[in-house]
Image: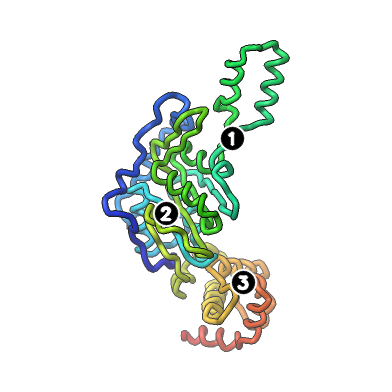
Amino acid sequence: MGGTTAGRTGEAGDGGARRAAGPAAGPPGDPQDARDPQDPQDPQDAQEVRDPQEVRRRLEDVGYLVDEGLATACFLALRLHRPVFCEGDAGVGKTSLAGALAGMLDAPLIRLQCYEGIDASQALYDWDFPRQLLHLRAAEAAGVTDVERLEAELYDRRFLVERPLLRALRTQPSVLLVDEVDRADDEFEAFLLELLSEYSVTVPELGTLRADVPPVVVLTSNRTREVHDALKRRCLYHWFDHPSFARELAIVRSRLPAVSARLAEQVTALVQALRSEELVKPPGVAETIDWAEALDALGATELDAELAVATLGSVLKYREDTERARSLDLSAILALRAAGA
């Protein structure tokens, strides 16, 4: 969607070395425990695609339009088991890519929302202390006095609370979205770097947990700060630009087929015009869709300047931007669009 470049930023030929080496030794770390025995789908087969064109077609089948560069990046991510690092302004479709890949693969989407101060325990796993305490009290009431047995039971898998990263390693196939990684601290970035290199993690009480088939990983960044090069080198990089008029209109029509063609065209034209202004927060594709959906909910089949001004809150989120939009000759912009300019 709207991206201009895609390519490997890592060393050539090292993708295969980053595949998981296989199931972890010993029952505690065997990720196959997480599979549904009734599901005949092999997680590796689920990610098999022949070429970028197939990826593009299958993504379009789930309503996500991509250009050749992004289709190629997704194909390589599936083939080489490398994360896709998506960077660009908010609202250009980075997060939606993860959902589309999950739909395409018929796999669960597991999301980790990054924020300042997030640490490994919040992203990886924790122990269920209240349940452990209840277990101790129940054992005490039953007269159990074997201390070693009690300690072993306390760190049984049933008391393990899986956070998104561990859940993604143990769910196959799956799509892991690490959203807004630029909001996390440097220390968390380093932790992610290690995890995405090996697709395994060590829980001291249980041993090493490793994914047989790595999850499909999508990292997003709104570029509020620069993410370290080391993390980018692990990934396939794709810059998400705002789409052209034709592509954005196609996205709106695809996502909102009930909206009239004329209304979709007018809304897209106005959003494209607003983006050329000096706004605090230029609207993304998500706002274009929101605006068209809001107008459709009001029963509109076409747009005029008065209705546009009345509904600016669906597309602009800053007072300064709203005032700037009101100062524009929206009628003239719509007239130009109608004239095919």
Q: Where is residue 125 in the image (x, y as percent from the top left)?
A: 56, 38
Q: What element carries label 3?
A: loop
Q: Earlier in the sequence, mark 2 or mark 3?
A: 2
User: Disc 3 marks which residue?
Assistant: 315
Q: Is residue 172 above or below residue 95?
A: above
User: Disc 1 marks which residue?
Assistant: 161
Q: Position of residue 321 (x, y in %)?
A: 63, 78
- Do the CB atoms of the residues marked 2 and 3 lie less than 8 Å apart? no
Residue at the spot 70% in from the left edge and 24% down from the top edge: 134
Could you tell me the amino acid type at mark 1? Answer: Val
Q: In which quarter of the image is the N terminus?
A: bottom left
In the visual, does 288 lie left or right of 22?
right
In the visual, does 133 lie left or right of 283?
right
Q: Is mark 1 on a helix, strand or loop?
A: strand
Choose between 203 and 135: the one closer to the eye: 203
Q: What element carries label 2?
A: helix
Which numbered disc, 1 or 3, marks the residue closer to the eye? 1
